[in-house]
Image: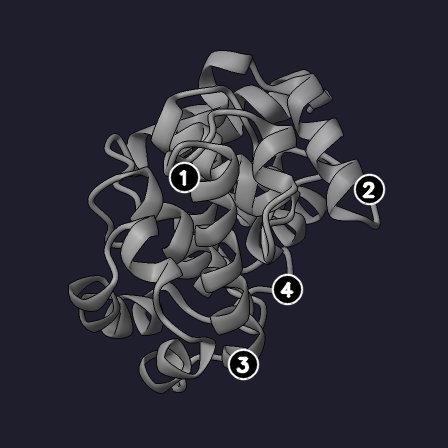
Amino acid sequence: MTKSERVAWVAKHLAKLYPETPIPLDHRDPFTLLVAVVLSAQCTDKKVNEVTPALFALAGTPEQMARLSPAKVLEIIRPLGLAPQKSKALVGLSQMLLEHHQGQVPASFEALEALPGVGHKTASVVMAQAFGVPAFPVDTHIHRLAKRWKLSAGKSVEQVERDLKKVFPQESWNQLHLRIIFYGREYCTARGCDGRTCPLCRQLNVRA
């Protein structure tokens, strides 16, 4: 199977499995999505969704979040990994949104990545899911599956992102990155598949 055939096979079968691609993080607007994505670093979406209702009830806008102390935010998000750093980042980014962006989440990679606690992956998720800008956020699932499916040999998430953007049509990126994540969680887990066990890996290896 050529690489282009492999790419087409992956896209076709993921689209069949996941025709709908709901955002796994509960949110109601670009700001609450940004907060949820920041909180999701080294943490499951399920765990984030357990703490955000209480956080958003208290601080669902940049104005409300900026008025809180990091210690108060920490009380709510303590069950999450890296909670002390995340609490400072949420207060800091909210203050920056008020000072530099009229309290609005900017629709710009550069502006987003200048906010505390916001890296390229977080900015990519927000740009894709809040603003519909084509992006391909690469998490651990996508990094693992891209290698297993021989779509990228990149050792860094940056290289994997570049490789996947080259082979998949831009208009598919925003749905496709979620489809790969869903598949990685449901079928092709880090311990549950060795690159030959799950349905897609089996098919790709058989047809390699």
Density class for disc 4 (Cα within 10 Å; few <14, some 14-19, many ≥20) is few
Alpha carbons under labels 1 and 3: distance apart: 31 Å
Helix, strand or loop under label 3: helix
Where is 149 relative to 73, above or below? above
Where is 144 relative to 9, above or below? below
- Residue under label 3, please give it: 84
Alpha carbons under labels 1 and 2: distance apart: 20 Å
Residue 153: mark in rendering: 2
Where is 192 relative to 162, above or below? below
Q: Is residue 24 visible?
A: no
- Residue under label 4, please give it: 194
Q: Which of marks 2 and 4 is in front?
A: 2
Q: Nearer the viewer, residue 183 or 100?
A: 100
Nearer-N-terminus badge (2/4): 2
Q: Which of marks 1 and 3 is in front?
A: 3
Density class for disc 1 (Cα within 10 Å; few <14, some 14-19, many ≥20) is many
Helix, strand or loop under label 2: loop
Q: Can residue 157 be seen in this view?
A: yes
Where is 191 relative to 165, above or below? below
Nearer-N-terminus badge (3/4): 3
- In the image: residue 29, left or right of residue 181: left
Nearer-N-terminus badge (1/2): 2
Query: Image quadrant for the N terminus?
Result: top right
Residue 83: mark in rendering: none
- Residue under label 1, please give it: 179
Q: x, y percentage for residue 104? A: 37, 34
Q: What residue type is labelled 4?
A: Asp
